[in-house]
């Protein structure tokens, strides 16, 4: 069973990402790298990347939007677990991939996509862990 306890936690939108990056919070540098990598991989603007802090825990959500303002992906970064969960924007209830300590521990993609190792396309995001 997948541990997705963070889904449904209260969220706080971080309006000024640059201010957050300069805040001195331990994870700020890694989150900045994650957001920057999302921008590059999903070919979108910085303004199309939204950052949230979830609950009272150190869990961060990154929402990635395309040029048409539609949600492309949601990433949940759990720094204490060295974990990154990636969800498709059209199916936010079920993860596509879960990485823990830079190892893919779950893949929810179809067999044909597993065969071509589609998760390797997202490895730059995992480098943050």
Image (cartoon, rainbow, N blue to C red):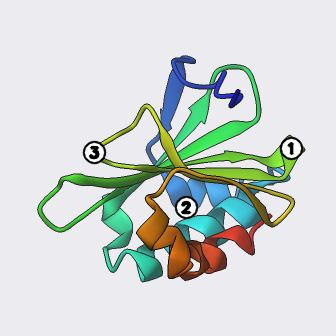
Whether residue 37 is visible to the viewer of this picture, yes or no, is no
Taking 5 as reference, is 48 left or right? left
In this view, 32 is above or below 20: below
- Mark 3 lies on residue: 90
Q: In this view, does 45 lie to the left or right of 117?
A: left
Marks 2 and 3, the one that precedes in the sequence:
2
Identify the residue position indicated by label 1 in the image: 81
Of circles 1 and 2, the one toward us is 1
- Under circle 1, the secondary element is helix
Label 3 neighbourhood size at 10 Å, few (<14), some (14-19), many (20+)? Answer: few
Task: Give the alpha-carbon distance from disc 3 to disc 1, as whole Å.
Answer: 26 Å
Residue at image coords 43%, 31%: 93
Residue 23 in view here: yes
Q: Where is residue 127 in the image (x, y as percent from the top left)?
A: 74, 75
Kind of element beneath mark 3 = loop
The reply to whether the C-beta atoms of the residues labelled 2 and 3 are less than 8 Å apart is no
Relative vertical location of residue 21 with respect to residue 4 in this rendering, above or below: below
Q: In this image, 25 relative to 3: left or right? A: right
Where is residue 83? Give x, y as percent.
Answer: 77, 50
- Which quarter of the figure has residue 59? top right
Alpha carbon separation for disc pair 2 and 3: 28 Å
Indicate which disc, 1 or 2, sits on the residue closer to the N terminus: 2
Question: Which residue carries the number 2 mark?
Answer: 18
Q: Quadrant of the N terminus?
A: top right
Q: Are marks 1 and 2 in contact (CB under 8 Å)?
A: no
Which residue: 64% across, 28% down?
A: 4
Q: Is residue 112 above or below residue 43?
A: above
Task: Using the numbered discs, state the Cα–Cα distance from disc 1 to disc 2 in whole angstroms.
Answer: 25 Å
Circle 2: element type: helix
> In this rendering, which labeled residue sits more in front, label 3 or label 1?
3
Task: Give the x, y percent position of residue 7.
Answer: 55, 24
How crowded is the residue under tag 2: few (<14 C-alpha within 10 Å), some, or many (20+)? few
């Amino acid at each position: 069973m997948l541990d997705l306890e963070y889904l449904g936690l209260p969220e706080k939108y971080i309006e000024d990402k640059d201010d957050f990056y300069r805040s001195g919070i331990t994870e700020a540098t890694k989150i900045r790298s994650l957001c920057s990598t999302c921008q590059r991989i999903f070919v979108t603007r910085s303004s199309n990347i939204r950052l949230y802090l979830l609950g009272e825990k150190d869990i961060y959500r990154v929402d990635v939007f395309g040029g048409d303002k539609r949600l492309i992906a949601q990433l949940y970064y759990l720094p204490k677990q060295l974990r990154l969960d990636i969800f498709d924007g059209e199916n936010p209830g079920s993860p596509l991939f879960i990485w823990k300590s830079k190892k893919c521990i779950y893949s929810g993609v179809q067999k044909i996509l597993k065969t071509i190792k589609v998760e390797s396309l997202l490895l730059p995001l995992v480098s943050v862990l």
